[in-house]
């Protein structure tokens, strides 16, 4: 089998490429380089510059590399940007997926893994989010992921493609410092950014109905996430694999913003007291995955804890930002 990883030179894509080649899989990456760090890719993984919006390019890559399965991660991923530019998000995330699925079907490829997000759930008022929790995204980014899942399942049925949709929770950390996330869009790099500027971390709201009043999330190490992709790819490769699977990828454990900032203080040695500011609109008090279905279907569970995530993310931050 040869797997094409779209968005392969991105933060998660490079980790997936590393995990899959490390386990002996043959991998090729496709990336339009709009948000990529190509040096992240393992040396033995060819990188093709191209967009998922370009069907002819995709067909040529499938033929040239003998692609037999696709891991589709290429997407725009910033919630705020999706609110400001919804047509672009639908065009690139959903339109790019439709073009990709047409090319996959035309090439007779029978396996596809789709990178979805906990954003499909919106803000459900439940202790643990299971895959049966109703989906009600609260921004265009989450909508494109939910529409993407629908499209993946419909195309899977129509064209005989076995599919897996993985709904990632809050991704953090790095397998090695070079592979770290270079963006400042998630809480861990946002706190590092504040500390590097000699500013206290910010907490948006400490009056939520949670044990310490701050929002609770499910953080997952990107290396664990990459291993989940490998397990899902292996599952799709099994003879007779068919149908579609949709799985939460989280640890099943809640960590509050205040607890996370305490761990960041321990790791960085910068223990300054966070500033408490007003709640941000749209933040759910709690979003924690039930991780049981992934364990049952893939035999996969996250192994790395929040301390390991923060430590590895901090090493990556220091490498990229010279802190
Ligand atoms: N990082 C997270 O916390 C998180 C959480 C849930 C889901 N996701 C999803 O995981 C996937 C990967 O996220 P990431 O954090 O690695 O983001 P990233 O921006 O680091 O990687 C995305 C990669 O895709 C490329 N790309 C974008 N549009 C493309 C297109 N049309 N054709 C080809 N390449 C394209 C970019 O250049 C980039 O290298 C995305 O689908 C994202 O929505 C990420």
Image (cartoon, rainbow, N blue to C red):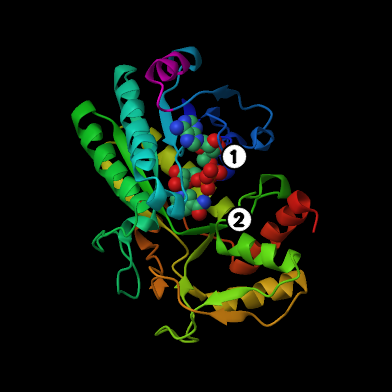
Residue nearest the viewer, comparing 52 with 26? 52
Residue at the spot 40% in from the left edge and 70% down from the top edge: 281
For this orientation, the residue located farthest to the right is 322
For marks 2 and 1, give the CA distance: 18 Å
How many numbered discs, if any? Answer: 2
* Residue holding disc 1: 14
- Which region shows up in magenta? 52-62
Does 192 appear above or below 180?
below
User: Residue 255 shows which numbered tag?
Assistant: none
* Image location (x, y in percent) of residue 299: 43, 53
Mark 2 vs mark 1: in front? 2
Mark 2 surroundings: few (<14), some (14-19) or many (≥20) residues within 10 A: few
Question: Relative to 314, does residue 195 appear above or below in the rendering?
Answer: below
Please tell me which of labels 2 and 1 falls first in the chain.
1
Give the SS element for disc 1: helix
Horizontal side of residue 122 vs 29, given as left or right: left
Which of the two residues, 47 or 33, is positioned nearer the viewer here? 33
> Please, is residue 6 above or below residue 231 in the view?
above
Q: Picture coordinates of residue 167 (x, y %)? A: 39, 53
Residue 157 left/right relative to 18: left
| Residue 70 x/y as whole percent | 42, 31
Numbered mark located on residue 184 in the image: 2
């Amino acid at each position: 089998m040869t797997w094409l990883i779209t968005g392969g030179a991105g933060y998660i894509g490079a980790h997936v490429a590393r995990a899959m080649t490390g386990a002996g899989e043959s991998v090729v990456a496709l990336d339009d380089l709009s948000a990529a760090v190509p040096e992240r890719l393992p040396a033995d993984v060819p990188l093709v510059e191209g967009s998922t919006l370009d069907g002819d390019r995709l067909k040529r890559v499938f033929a040239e590399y003998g692609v037999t399965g696709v891991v589709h991660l290429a997407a725009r991923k910033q919630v705020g940007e999706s609110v400001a530019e919804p047509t672009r998000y639908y065009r690139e995330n959903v339109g790019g997926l439709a073009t990709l699925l047409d090319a996959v079907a035309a090439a007779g490829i029978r396996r596809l893994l789709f990178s979805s997000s906990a954003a499909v759930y919106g803000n459900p008022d439940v202790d643990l989010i299971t895959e049966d929790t109703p989906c009600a995204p609260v921004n265009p980014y989450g909508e494109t992921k939910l529409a993407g899942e629908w499209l993946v399942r419909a195309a899977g049925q129509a064209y005989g493609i076995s599919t897996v949709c993985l709904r990632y929770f809050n991704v953090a950390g790095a397998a090695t410092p070079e592979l770290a996330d270079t963006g400042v869009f998630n809480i861990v790099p946002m706190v590092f950014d504040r500390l590097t500027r000699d500013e206290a971390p910010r907490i948006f709201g400490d009056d939520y109905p949670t044990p310490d009043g701050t929002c609770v999330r499910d953080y997952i190490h990107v290396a664990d996430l990459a291993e989940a992709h490998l397990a899902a790819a292996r599952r799709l490769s099994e003879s007779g694999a068919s149908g579609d699977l949709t799985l939460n990828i989280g640890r099943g454990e809640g960590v509050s913003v205040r607890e996370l900032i305490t761990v960041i203080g321990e790791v960085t040695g910068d223990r300054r007291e966070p500033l408490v500011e007003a709640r941000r609109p749209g933040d759910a008090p709690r979003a924690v995955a039930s991780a049981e279905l992934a364990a049952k279907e893939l035999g996969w569970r996250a192994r790395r804890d929040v301390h390991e995530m923060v430590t590895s993310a901090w090493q990556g931050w220091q490498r990229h930002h010279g802190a």
